[in-house]
Image (cartoon, coloured by chain):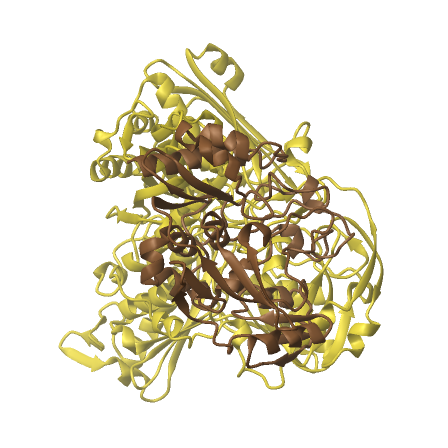
Chain colours: A yellow, B brown
Amino acid sequence: MKFDTPAGQNPIDQLKVVGKPTDRIDGKFKTTGTAPYAYERHDVVANQAYGYVLGAGISKGRVRAIHVEDAKRAPGVLAVVTTLESPRLERGMMNTAYLFGGDVIQHYHQAIAVVVAETFEQARAAAFLVKVDYAAEAGKFDLAAEAKGAPPVPSDSGEGSGGDGEERVGDFDGAFAQAPVTLDETYSTADESHAMMEPHATVAAWDGDKLTLWTSNQMIAWGHGSVAKILGIPKENVRIDSPYVGGGFGGKLFVRADAVLAALGAKAAGRPVKVALTRPLIANNTTHRPATIQRVRIGATKDGTITAIAHESTSGNLPDGDPETAVSQTKLLYAGANRLTAMKLAHLDLPEGNAMRAPGEAPGLMVLEVAMDEMAEKLGLDPVEFRIRNDTQVDPQAPERPFSHRDLIGCLKLGAEKFGWAKRNPRPGQVRNGQWLIGVGMAAAFRNNMVLKSGARVRLDGAGTVTVETDMTDIGTGSYTIIAQTAAEMMGLPLDKIVVRLGDSDFPVSSGSGGQFGANSSTAGVYAACVKLREAVAQRLGINSADAVFADGEVRAGNRAVPLGDAAAQGALSAEDTIEFGDISKKQQQSTFGAHFVEVGVDADTAEIRVRRMLAVCAAGRILNPKSARSQVIGGMTMGTGAALMEELAVDTKRGFFANHDLAGYEVPVHADIPHQEVIFLDEVDPMSSPMKAKGVGELGICGVGAAVANAVYNATGIRVRDYPLTLDKFLERMPDAA
Amino acid sequence: MRSFTYERPSTPAEAAAAVAAKPNAKFIAGGTNLLDLMKLQIETPAHLVDVNGLGLDRIEATPEGGLRIGALVRNTDLAADARVRKDYGVLSRALLAGASGQLRNKATTAGNLLQRTRCPYFYDTAQACNKRQPGSGCSALDGVSRQLAVIGGSDACIATHPGDMAVAMRVLDATVETVDAQGTERKIPIAEFHRLPGDKPEVDTTLKTGELITAVTLPKPVAGTHIYRKVRDRASYAYALVSVAAILGKDGSGHVAFGGVAHKPWRVEAAEAALPRGAKAVTDHVFAGAKPTHENAYKLKLAERTLTAALNQARA
């Protein structure tokens, strides 16, 4: 199905099933331990052995020799595969660093060997017996030191943000110089780890030339092609299966060392092998969100109209890597005739920087929306009003492109009202409650809505059950549920008559999960397949498909009503289709919007910061399931709070690695850090997005929330710290005297 | 994890003898720290002597009016004991500020005293660490050190004792009771139990090989407000950046020990006379001679301000 004109009335608009806050249909499996994750796929193939991945102990250089004799003699060991036995393997889609093979070490904990044994404990113990001789080389590990002179580089996050290295509209320098009120500040954000609950894990089994990987991956089709390329085997010989994913956040968009080394280990051992990356390897072996140094300049008239806005970001990466697309939202969020954005890239020899939940916008808005707060204060304007005053309904860089639907102002106004924003004391450091300095802050949320081609297959059986198959993944987001809701709505069935099967490369290729494109794109693919199935049903029943009504398990036309299952009485009916998006998404700008409001307390003595309440108001088209959508938004708010207050991969700039590489050292928010969270969705549809009229919310929640926290901290203390995360050590010297 | 042998003796003296008899043997109680370290081959004992069955799990009154806490009393049980809550609030609060409910259910009183540092370089076997591998050097000195010691360190090591309970034990003047392989009993004041790293950072305590902790005794209760104030980067389940264990009167007089700042709970009794004059007078004395890194110098200011918070609480 081609989608190239705005969606008209269609069966989804009935909203009998879609749009309801249905419990996740996989919820009971998750909570009872019966939704097996990759490492728990004990039943899929017999005789599984265990692989343990050894990471390099240097950050840059070469491997001279790997001594495996002792390891091979250790109890239970079946095989040891080292990087020196293999040529450097091809990289998969969007891999920057090489995953395995050859003697070159590009970064710390790069995989250099896998030890396969009968048990995990034996494999791990034997891995400690592997001795490696290195020729270490000096590397570059300090972003601040390398930032000077970093050139502008174009980039595409692959998740909906990107652009040229430098983009200009009008005359920024002239307008900024003439602006009566200006702001020019520099901020920094930290390297962050996805820190998903389920580590990267794969079970690999060879059957002759055929390889099956039971793995944990967000993008099955990308992974399918990548595995074939990396291993140099035909795609037809690879199958990937990933029905449950215990969190990805972008860390599982691409094939990683677990999959490659499970496959190589299985080949060497001659039997199936399972590999999970250990927690330390997740920080340094896989990808992370790169640190940034960002400069924002804003010029405005005295009444608060922005006349000049510039946002420049510098980040680091390995050779062949990309810059963080932290300036993308600044091209679209606010009006202003004179504009400059730039992404600069420094060469660093730290592990690979790559996509993490809202790549670009998450760190970009953490900075832009603090700058807006600072600018509002300079102008003597309420920060909500300042944003409203600079709203735009068209792409400021290309005014002929309107937004398909943009209600940022609605989010700001409703949020301000529900949060009690009017009660805020705009003078910072004035509100105290016992030990706590209290402050409130807000920020806009913004994230583009990407649409990706997505396919599905639906099959009706004689019992009236519809089975949906698509390689879409459910990474904890609720894909199973919204896909079932879509099929139920289309076929006039209750949810318990729908079976959803996901994550298998034998199924039709879907959008996959990433860039908050999955929910809208994949359900639109299911919609397309269901349209075909409805036609097939009508044809089988001898009904004109235009007249057929699918409701309550029946097909009705005129006075006739037939149970849906009857259409398949003579054999199952199957239909497959793919939604393909024309240039509709290019002609108009599709984005999602929101407003975050946060109240914090800052301990007057210790400067400990604790969030007290949070509210997000979101405008993201039709909300397919308000319950799972809310979970996505509060998850984003939690993650953004972590980024604002505590999350930082601590760089050892001398040795070149992230030192706090476990969950004791890399702190993410715990329950006690996250108090009351509220989410309100504006009731809206966007007919430009798809037949579902929905947009993504999976990343909107993290966008801007860190700035709202930071602005609240400033309102509480009067201290502006521009270096994230806002840990207490950065405040202590400037805190008022302890009373 | 390397293979090891295992036994469960029936008396404390047998347990001590069992560890003394074999090279590279270790006691195991709750295992909440040791097992993790064994998996990473930071600890590689050849033999484990399980002390869980020795009956050292009672809390009893002492003739002196204090409490004798068995070495195997779980952290959860100790924190919840009515006598501890009533008379030694600083201890109960310190325990509850540490770890998680699950870990406290398993972790023991003696094991808590013996937990090892959380320095990131101690945990990464590819990095130099004198505590893990004597003579290999210390990566932390010019590495990531935000969490590490500001005082009492050496050129060989700036690790901290990561615990909370021991800081409260220190301000309570607890005594560690032990038995050795010969059955000889010894009482070690808590002040002398943990050592400074010096040039032997691999040795955390003054225990001798095979010497088994049987109990920790507390003297009779000290009047005052019992405070344990732990400052950390998140609200729960994090190691202290700085902690203050204090017993303070309304006038501010009393006793104070600091956690998260040194290789042992840090207390300078001679500084305590200055408590009624406010925090700075005390911390200037307590932290005289501190040698922080550029990453952890904030701990000095934080210690002062956290003590201020404690003094305010006591006066309120």
Q: Position of residue A371 (x, y in %)?
A: 43, 27
Quarter of the image for residue B179 reads bottom right
Evaluate whether residue A123 shows in this view.
yes
Camera-nearest residue between A234 and A268: A268
Q: Position of residue A207 (x, y in %)?
A: 66, 83
Which residue is pictured at 33% across the width and 60% down the height?
Answer: B83
- Compared with A596, A251 (above or below) is below
Evaluate whether residue A476 shows in this view.
no
Which residue is pictured at 67% across the width and 65% down the height?
Answer: B43
Which residue is pictured at 34% across the width and 34% down the height?
Answer: B312
Camera-nearest residue between A286 and A464: A286
Q: Position of residue A368 (x, y in %)?
A: 45, 31
- Compared with B249, A519 (above or below) is below
Is A693 left or right of A399, judged from the image as shown? Answer: left
Q: Identify the residue at the far right of this view.
A: A64
Q: Position of residue A51 (x, y in %)?
A: 67, 73
Is A157 left or right of A79, judged from the image as shown? Answer: left
Is A660 left or right of A303, judged from the image as shown? Answer: right
Quarter of the image for residue A387 reads top left
Is B207 left or right of B32, judged from the image as shown? Answer: right
- Compared with A455, A429 (above or below) is above
Which residue is pictured at 73% across the width and 56% down the height?
Answer: B126
Quarter of the image for residue A596 reads top left
